[in-house]
Amino acid sequence: MLNSMWAGFRNLAVFTILVSVVAQPQAQGRLDLAGLAVYTDTARDIYVAGLRTADGQPVPDLSALQGPIIMEYRITTRRISARGFSGTLLLQAELGSGERAPDAVVDALGELKRTMKGSLLMGDQFEIGLTERGNTVFNLDGTRLFDVDGAETFAFLIQGWLGSSASALLREPLSSRSLDDGIMTRFESLIPLNERVDTVAAWGNDAAEEPQQVAAAPEPAPTPESEPEPEVAAAPEPEPEPEVDAGAAAAAAAAAAATAAAATPEPVQVASAPEPEPQPEPLPELPPSSEPVVAQLEPEPELEPELEPAAPATDDRASALAEMDDREYQRQLNEYLAQVLGMVFREVRYPRRAVNRELEGKVEMLAEISLEGKLLGVEVLETSGHGLLDRAAIAAVEEGAPFPPLSAVAQEEFLSDDGENYVLMIPVNFRLQ
């Protein structure tokens, strides 16, 4: 049932790849890739990043940007709301720059949320471009959403990829012309269907009928420096029992991180790189911002108490979400995910036979849950290629349930396509080290 929701987005029979342009498309043409990277947040791959320049060379100087340049985001997660994506862009840029976003950037992201009439879906191709004339443009699936005068917005947002404080997992491959073959294959496979292109084109038509204004911004205030990005790597040691406990520490680390004061993470191994919350309020440290490495580590403290149940979707809840700051929205989303993933990861067992045969692989699952957090079903979305590992991953989800009742933000992000229940993508990566 759940896999049927993905059929449209994984139909690779669509061979027409949209041409990425920012301005004067006939003269400018398609820009060349200068770098590729995968952005992972709270154990979920969110997008594949593609940096395009006129000559395919890395951007030499962020202080003197010259267009045309395109930041291309090819969405890999099942669904991410306009609010969630806007918050991701904001917090990445604030981390990378070490500064609070100028008002002009906040206004541009507000315009993005207004222009998008729905969520981003797997296969969408979102672009932020700097034109040859020095303006900033926002495109989605070949449709121009809106423009912003001047380069200030682009110059700030690109710091989320290339800034001095940006995650090295993004900055290094995007600034060194790294075109990994595996990432390239994935990047090229993410294509929107024709129906989706038509839907987005209607958004652009609606936006073109309304005036757009972007305010100038005062000098941004500095934010705290980001903490170093920890990595966890340990080889699992099989126990005498039929299976080897392989996920206790990764889970506990995710749970403990949900209450520590730090920042929104960037993708790393198991434990995430804390991404700083700009002043005035710090964000808590969050769970793994990379693929959860299944490895036997020292146990951490037990999970914090579950979140309070949120009321079903109402006009009041929608109004409260609309008034919520993007940073707070992301904090609450990551806090909920920290609890759910932590509950799953601590139940992961690396099967003894898989260890003996040196089997590795990543399993991506779709878990359908009710508003109250009851597990209604779980299916493998992407197999590891080994039945032993797939079954162990499913068992971890089943043993980890029931989950906390969905917070208001989680309801906003994870509503299923039929609008009746909620769907979370849960990854488990079995890796021997």
Image: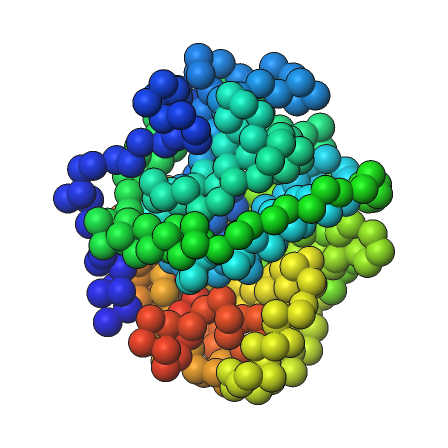
Q: Quadrant of residue 422?
A: bottom left
Residue farthest left in this picture: 13
- Location of residue 307 with respect to 274 vertically, above or below: below
Closer-to-camera residue (237/293): 293
- Location of residue 81 with respect to 19 vertically, above or below: below
Residue at 36% in and 32% down: 20
Residue 419: x and y in percent read 37, 78
- The colour style of the image is rainbow
On the question of residue 158 being in view, the answer is no
Residue 393: x and y in percent read 39, 61
Residue 150 falls left or right of residue 14: right
On the question of residue 7 being in view, the answer is yes
Closer-to-camera residue (44/428): 44
Residue at 70% in and 21% down: 63
Closer-to-camera residue (43/431): 43
Residue at 43% in and 61% down: 117
Residue 312: x and y in percent read 52, 86
Residue at 34% in and 40% down: 142
Q: Which quarter of the rendered picture does the N terminus lie within?
A: bottom left
- Location of residue 165 with respect to 340 vertically, above or below: above
Residue 96: x and y in percent read 69, 36
